């Protein structure tokens, strides 16, 4: 098998890759809302065809003496199906919001990337006597299968995609809450009443990690810092309740109508998702500020931003059909926790009192 045949295969492959790259650019553009929307089930079926064609390609390219013409025909058939898959994916973007579009684009890109790797490796291994190259082709076929199979888990509606985004925020907040509960007070005077109370509070909190070590970073909080941490845990817990009630409220609205293609409804949900993500960022910031030395100004700023975000959330829900009673109660509970947290931040620490006493002594 000469160099000329391999160069011919490379030329054929590059032509197909360029065509797919051009089609991918179409996928980046939003189709007109007046077009008929392609159902995601059709996209999944075309993905199954890509998987089957990948299996045939793997068998052909790992054969004993594959002919160049047969390999070129295989490439043409494969990339025609792949292009059809991308065009159907583009059709499924009709009236899709940013979140759904991003999910679809990501899934389609995984199918394309795995396909490119399969054929680039296949052409590279043509004429090679290295067993490793031949053995890698079935693995790359498996990657194509996995990317096509993942299409079944891709959200097919705006509401589903946005709901998953909100759920991801809830999971992230839950992780921060778990890390906060692992904070423990450092050594102090065991007779100190504040220290004893902070220690008892920390020990009473459920621990998710049985292997946590008291010598880890963050386990040397002063009694005052532990009180701030305990108050912050209350804020994060209430925030998690707000996010869960928001998801529950939206689910309740979906039972009343099917608003997946209603642009105003989707716009409101997209704004609510951004607010959720914003509150998730503030919770991350709050968690980072609790490690000593605690950043009180940053924690106060975070608290103010969370206050503002939950107000905006209620406004957006009013633009739909109004927040549920449960969501309003959850927001009020979070506001109460934020006020307690801010009052805890306003309390002078032992270090503050010592500094004031020293200033008084120096000035007298």
Image (cartoon, rainbow, N blue to C red):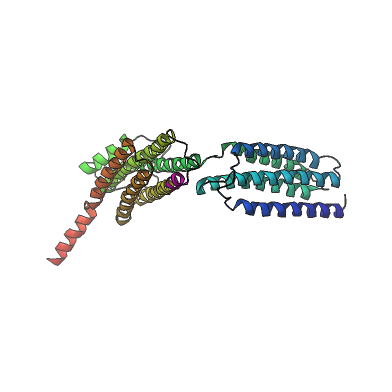
Q: Is residue 185 visible?
A: no
- Residue 107: horizontal and vertical position, in percent? 60, 44
Q: Is residue 218 left or right of residue 335?
A: right
Q: Which residue is situated farthest in the bottom direction here?
A: 363
Q: Is residue 50 visible?
A: yes
Q: Which quarter of the image is occupied by the C terminus?
A: bottom left
- Residue 345: horizontal and vertical position, in percent? 25, 51
**103 or 229, nearer to the observer:** 103
Q: Residue at x 17, y 59 (%)?
A: 357
Total marks shown come to 0
Q: Is residue 290 left or right of residue 273?
A: left
Q: Is residue 51 left or right of residue 103?
A: right
Question: What span is in magenta?
Answer: 257-270
Is residue 281 positioned above or below 163 on the image? below
Residue 217 sits inside the magenta stretch = no
Q: Which residue is situated farthest in the left direction here?
A: 364
- Residue 123: horizontal and vertical position, in percent? 78, 49
**33 or 323, nearer to the observer:** 33
Q: Which residue is situated farthest in the front direction here?
A: 34
Q: Residue at x 57, y 45 (%)?
A: 104
Residue 269 sits inside the magenta stretch = yes
Q: Is residue 148 left or right of residue 54?
A: left
**93 or 4, nearer to the observer:** 93
- Residue 38: horizontal and vertical position, in percent? 60, 41
């Amino acid at each position: 098998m000469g160099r000329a045949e391999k160069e011919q295969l490379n030329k054929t492959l590059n032509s197909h890759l360029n065509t797919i790259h051009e089609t991918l650019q179409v996928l980046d553009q939003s189709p007109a809302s007046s077009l008929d929307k392609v159902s995601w089930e059709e996209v999944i079926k075309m993905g199954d065809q890509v998987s089957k064609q990948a299996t045939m390609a793997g068998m052909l390219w790992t054969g004993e003496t594959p002919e160049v013409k047969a390999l070129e025909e295989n490439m043409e058939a494969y990339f025609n199906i792949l292009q059809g898959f991308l065009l159907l994916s583009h059709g499924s973007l009709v009236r899709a919001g940013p979140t759904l579009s991003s999910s679809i684009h990501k899934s389609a890109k995984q199918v394309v990337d795995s396909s490119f790797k399969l054929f680039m490796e296949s052409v590279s291994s043509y004429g090679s006597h290295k067993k490793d190259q031949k053995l890698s082709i079935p693995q790359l076929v498996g990657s194509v299968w996995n990317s096509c199979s993942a299409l079944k888990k891709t959200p097919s509606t705006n509401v589903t995609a946005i709901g998953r985004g909100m759920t991801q925020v809830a999971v992230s907040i839950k992780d921060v809450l778990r890390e906060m509960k692992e904070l423990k007070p450092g050594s102090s005077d065991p007779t100190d009443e504040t220290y004893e109370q902070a220690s008892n509070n920390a020990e009473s909190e459920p621990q998710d990690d049985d292997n946590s070590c008291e010598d880890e970073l963050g386990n040397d909080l002063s009694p005052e810092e532990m009180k701030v941490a305990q108050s912050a845990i209350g804020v994060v817990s209430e925030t998690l309740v707000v996010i869960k009630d928001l998801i529950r409220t939206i689910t309740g609205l979906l039972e009343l109508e099917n608003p997946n293609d209603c642009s105003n409804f989707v716009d409101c949900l997209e704004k609510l998702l951004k607010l959720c993500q914003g509150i998730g960022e503030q919770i991350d910031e709050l968690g980072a500020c609790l490690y000593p030395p605690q950043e009180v100004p940053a924690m106060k700023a975070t608290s103010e931003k969370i206050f503002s975000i939950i107000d905006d959330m209620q406004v957006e829900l009013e633009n739909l059909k109004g927040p549920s009673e449960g969501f309003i109660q959850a927001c009020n509970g979070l506001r109460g926790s934020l006020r307690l947290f801010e009052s805890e931040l306003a309390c002078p620490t032992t270090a503050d009192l010592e500094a004031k006493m020293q200033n008084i002594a120096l000035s007298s």
